[in-house]
Image (cartoon, rainbow, N blue to C red):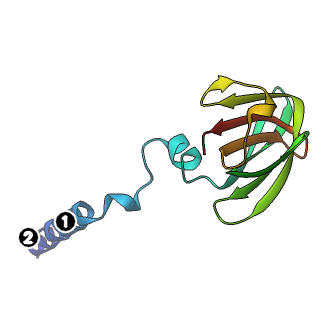
């Protein structure tokens, strides 16, 4: 009886191993969560960070620039949502990783906009469109 139970246990373990080996790798989260959540598939995110006793509610939007007005950008996000975001005059604006003035942003560029809560954006990262 004891031998029979041991054989069943071994068979069950082998079956579990076979299932795990056959499972598609896409079912697991990737090794780098930052790349997964903030990579090219990002539409928008809200990230809360506790820093020095203060909580920051960062909002991150990514989309194609549809319009630019003094102090604001309108983006069409990947899911079709249109959002207009105020941009601080002191915001860091980068184009392909290099600092540029706000005036160089153009319709059709892909931009990632970062703001703390409902405050104007503190950073805009753009790439050519």
Q: Which residue is at 27% across, 62% downward?
A: 20
Height in image: 86 above or below 78? above
Percent coordinates x, y for residue 37 in the rendering: 57, 49
Q: CB atoms at circles 1 and 2 under 8 Å apart?
A: no
Lower sequence index among marks 1 and 2: 2
**Crowding at mark 2 (Cα within 10 Å: few <14, some 14-19, many 20+):** few
Percent coordinates x, y for residue 92 in the rendering: 77, 27
Q: In which quarter of the image is residue 11?
A: bottom left
User: Left or right: where does residue 118 sit relative to residue 11?
Assistant: right
User: Left or right: where does residue 47 sit relative to residue 91?
Assistant: left
**Crowding at mark 1 (Cα within 10 Å: few <14, some 14-19, many 20+):** few
Percent coordinates x, y for residue 128 in the rendering: 60, 40
Q: Quadrant of residue 53?
A: top right
Q: Which of 88 and 104 is in front in this view?
A: 104
Q: Which of 3 and 31 is in front in this view?
A: 31
Q: Which residue is at 39% across, 62% downward?
A: 27
The numbered dot on residue 54 is none
Percent coordinates x, y for residue 13 in the rendering: 20, 64
* Disc 1/disc 2 C-alpha distance (Å): 23 Å
Report helix, strand or loop for mark 1.
helix
Report helix, strand or loop for mark 2.
helix
* Residue that numbered label 1 is attached to: 18
Q: Which residue is at 18% across, 68% downward?
A: 9
The N terminus: image quadrant? bottom left
What residue occupies the far top of the structure in this picture? 99
Q: Which residue is at 69% across, 29% downward?
A: 94
* Residue that numbered label 2 is attached to: 3
User: Left or right: where does residue 57 sit relative to residue 28?
Assistant: right
Q: Nearer the viewer, residue 6 or 83?
A: 83
């Amino acid at each position: 009886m004891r031998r029979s139970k041991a054989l069943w246990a071994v068979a069950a373990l082998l079956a579990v191993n076979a299932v795990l080996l056959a499972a598609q790798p896409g079912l697991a989260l990737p090794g780098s969560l930052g790349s997964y959540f903030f990579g090219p598939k990002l539409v928008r995110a809200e990230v809360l960070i506790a820093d020095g006793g203060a909580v920051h509610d960062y909002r991150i939007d990514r989309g194609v620039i549809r319009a630019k007005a003094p102090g604001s950008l309108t983006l069409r996000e990947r899911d079709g949502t249109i959002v207009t975001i105020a941009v601080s005059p002191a915001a860091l604006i980068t184009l392909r990783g290099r600092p540029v003035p706000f005036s160089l942003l153009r319709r059709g560029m892909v931009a990632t906009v970062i703001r703390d809560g409902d405050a104007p954006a503190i950073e805009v990262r753009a790439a050519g469109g």
